[in-house]
């Protein structure tokens, strides 16, 4: 016969199991996920941030003709680098009103032997702008984590994304009333308030959060599951598979005989006639000045959702159209659509703001989940004022990640404004300032009581963000009052967004300062509950 204890014990239900899975998976990956979400959210305005961090570049009244710009840039690069073997040109757009070029030549000093530069879209002359990585830093950190080999960073990001997917599914299973709870928010109720906020942030963008996590994994599927591609023994076949998913032109051997480059203007105009005015995003030129030159006129990403390659390939010496690459296989197209949905490059201004706000809700979802872990367990400590080391460690990591990252991002912009434009390695120093400020916030979190650390870091973030428009007014020719008067919303919108974020951080800091946890009530003596009743109470 079974003992009374054995009879009382019952198997844990699916919701109890999913609850534990949701809590621990979310905590273990939460710190990296929060950084990924926040920097990824900023990356939806990657071009605008790059523009904001280059105040020397003025906003043009209108974009010049794409064919004229492409011709000017090609002529300039060939005149200054006659031995160039490849030229990649990105044409200006409404979001980035300058042209950029990368070119490979013997003795190239840049990455992989490529030199690069920014150019005036109207004249084709080099622009004298400060050295900065701008929005590219937040975009790259989002999936590379910067100070580590790129493959390591992507593997870590991929594992965390898998954890995120598990957390989303287990969270939906755990909270059977999650949609009803979305319309319920109880202020000043401690743990209950954090749980309500976590549920609201989760439900607000649940389809988006699932899409962004799943598509992020699909984007790097070849990295995580390379066996299909590596099974192809022929390197040419591997290149063809890659070219179905990415803009990749297999190297074309030079003939060794000189021949003038055909009319670039005519090639771009032929592409615009096919796709529409303003639909050309850039060009790739292989072996310019050789009889076997190739020119690919590339369609702009902003005109379509999928990131699969669309281009017209021309014979570079005769101008003859060789290939119109305007479709891909079903598998590549599926991957390209998911990639495009993840990046949001197709989005107009309104859709991009929607991406930003829902992604910001996802950031709040991860952050509130981290805080909820400590709020829930602090009330269960024997002495909440003297937590054990593991609890204190988690709490400090939460403070440094959630509040400290905002300080670090604000410090990046301060470095952009205050560092001398002549300092060597300037863009690298902007990044160094970012990480130094972030590291300082983790140290601060360990040195201060938790509540004071939260308040002080949110207050510091609010001050740094609020003063950035004033700093911009003193150090650049783009003060807020002037950009508002001129209707230059690329600049005015950035300053106004910084002010709004400063108010948000100030409000969170003020609410944290005002919050006083309720004293625990002594438990009344009662008959021992069965294991099944206690388990149900924990989930509820």
Image (cartoon, rainbow, N blue to C red):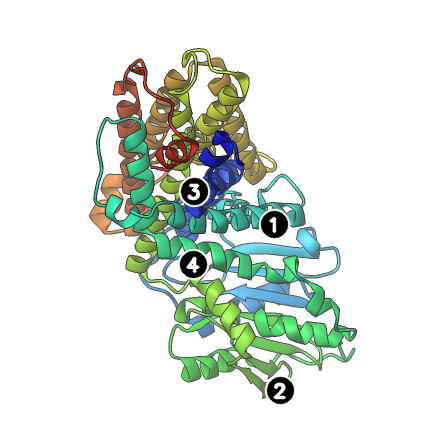
Disc 3 element: helix
Q: Are marks 1 and 4 in contact (CB under 8 Å)?
A: no
| Place of residue 447 in the rendered image (x, y in percent of width and height, measured from the top left) | 49, 14
Mark 3 or 4, nearer chain start: 3
Q: Helix, strand or loop at disc 4?
A: helix
Q: Viewed as shown, does residue 151 lie left or right of 54?
A: right
* Residue 57 in view in this figure: no
* Closer mark to the observer between disc 4 and disc 2: 4
The residue depicted at 66 percent of the width and 46 percent of the height is 152
Which mark is first along the chain, 2 or 3? Answer: 3
Crowding around mark 1 (Cα neighbors within 10 Å: few <14, some 14 to 19, many 20+) is many
The CA distance from mark 1 to mark 3 is 17 Å
- For label 4, the residue is 211
In the rendered image, which residue does mark 1 sit on? 154
Instruction: Tell us which disc is closer to us: 1 or 4.
Output: 4
Residue at mark 3 to residue at mark 4: CA–CA distance: 16 Å
Residue highlighted by disc 2: 318
- Figure quadrant of residue 207: bottom left
Q: Where 508 sits versus 525, above or below?
A: below
Q: Quadrant of residue 510?
A: top left
- The residues tagged by marks 1 and 2 sit, at their Cα atoms, a distance apart of 42 Å
Do tag 4 and tag 2 residues touch (Cβ < 8 Å)? no
User: How many neighbours does mark 4 have within 10 angstroms: few (below 14), some (14-19), or many (20 or more)?
Assistant: some
Q: Secondary structure at mark 2?
A: loop
Residue 193 point in image, percent of width and height: 28, 32
Question: Could you say which is closer to the camera, residue 350 or residue 358?
Answer: 358
Residue 454 lies in quadrant: top left
């Amino acid at each position: 016969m079974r003992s009374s204890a054995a009879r009382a014990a019952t198997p844990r239900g699916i919701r109890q199991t999913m609850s534990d899975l949701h809590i621990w998976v979310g905590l273990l990956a939460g710190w990296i996920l929060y950084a990924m979400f926040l920097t990824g959210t900023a990356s939806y305005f990657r071009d605008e941030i790059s523009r904001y961090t280059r105040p020397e570049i003025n906003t043009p009244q209108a974009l010049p003709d794409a064919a004229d710009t492409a011709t000017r840039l090609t002529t300039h690069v060939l005149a200054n680098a006659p031995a160039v073997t490849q030229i990649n040109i990105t044409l200006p757009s409404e979001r980035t009103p300058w042209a950029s070029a990368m070119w490979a030549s013997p003795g190239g000093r840049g990455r992989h032997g490529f030199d690069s530069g920014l150019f005036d879209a109207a004249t084709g002359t080099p622009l004298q702008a400060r050295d900065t990585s701008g929005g590219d830093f937040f975009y790259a950190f989002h999936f590379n984590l910067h100070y580590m080999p790129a493959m390591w960073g992507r593997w870590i990001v991929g594992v965390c994304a898998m954890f995120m997917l598990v957390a989303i599914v287990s969270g939906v299973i755990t909270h059977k009333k999650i949609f009803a709870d979305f319309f319920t928010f109880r202020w000043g109720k401690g743990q209950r308030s954090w749980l309500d906020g976590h549920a609201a942030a989760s439900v607000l963008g649940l389809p988006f959060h699932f899409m962004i996590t799943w598509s992020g994994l699909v984007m790097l599927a070849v990295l995580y599951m390379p066996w299909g591609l590596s099974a192809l023994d022929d390197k040419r076949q591997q290149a063809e598979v890659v070219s179905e998913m990415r803009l990749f032109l297999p190297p074309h051997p030079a003939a060794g005989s000189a021949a003038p480059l055909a009319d670039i203007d005519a090639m771009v105009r032929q592409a615009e006639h096919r796709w529409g005015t303003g639909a050309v995003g850039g060009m790739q030129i292989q072996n310019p000045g050789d009889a076997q030159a190739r020119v690919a006129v590339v369609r702009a990403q902003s005109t379509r959702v999928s990131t699969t390659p669309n281009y017209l390939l021309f014979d570079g010496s005769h101008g003859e159209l060789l290939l119109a690459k305007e479709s891909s296989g079903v598998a590549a197209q599926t991957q390209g659509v998911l990639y495009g949905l993840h990046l949001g490059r197709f989005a107009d201004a309104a859709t991009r703001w929607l991406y930003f706000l829902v992604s910001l809700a996802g950031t709040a979802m991860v952050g509130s989940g981290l805080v909820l872990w400590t709020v829930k367990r602090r009330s269960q400590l024997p002495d909440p004022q003297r937590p054990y080391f593991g609890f204190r460690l988690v709490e400090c990591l939460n403070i440094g990640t959630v509040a400290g990252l905002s300080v670090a991002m604000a410090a990046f912009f301060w470095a952009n404004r205050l560092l001398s434009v002549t300092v060597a390695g300037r863009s690298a120093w902007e990044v160094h300032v970012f990480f130094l400020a972030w590291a300082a916030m983790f140290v601060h979190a360990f040195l201060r009581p938790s509540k004071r650390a939260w308040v002080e870091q949110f207050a510091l973030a609010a001050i740094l963000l609020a003063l950035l428009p004033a700093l911009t007014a003193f150090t650049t020719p783009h003060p807020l009052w002037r950009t508002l008067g001129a209707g230059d919303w690329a600049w005015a919108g950035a300053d106004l967004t910084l002010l709004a974020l400063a108010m948000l951080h100030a409000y969170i800091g003020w609410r944290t300062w005002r919050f006083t946890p309720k004293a625990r009530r002594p438990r009344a003596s009662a008959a021992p509950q069965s294991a099944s009743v206690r388990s149900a109470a924990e989930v509820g």
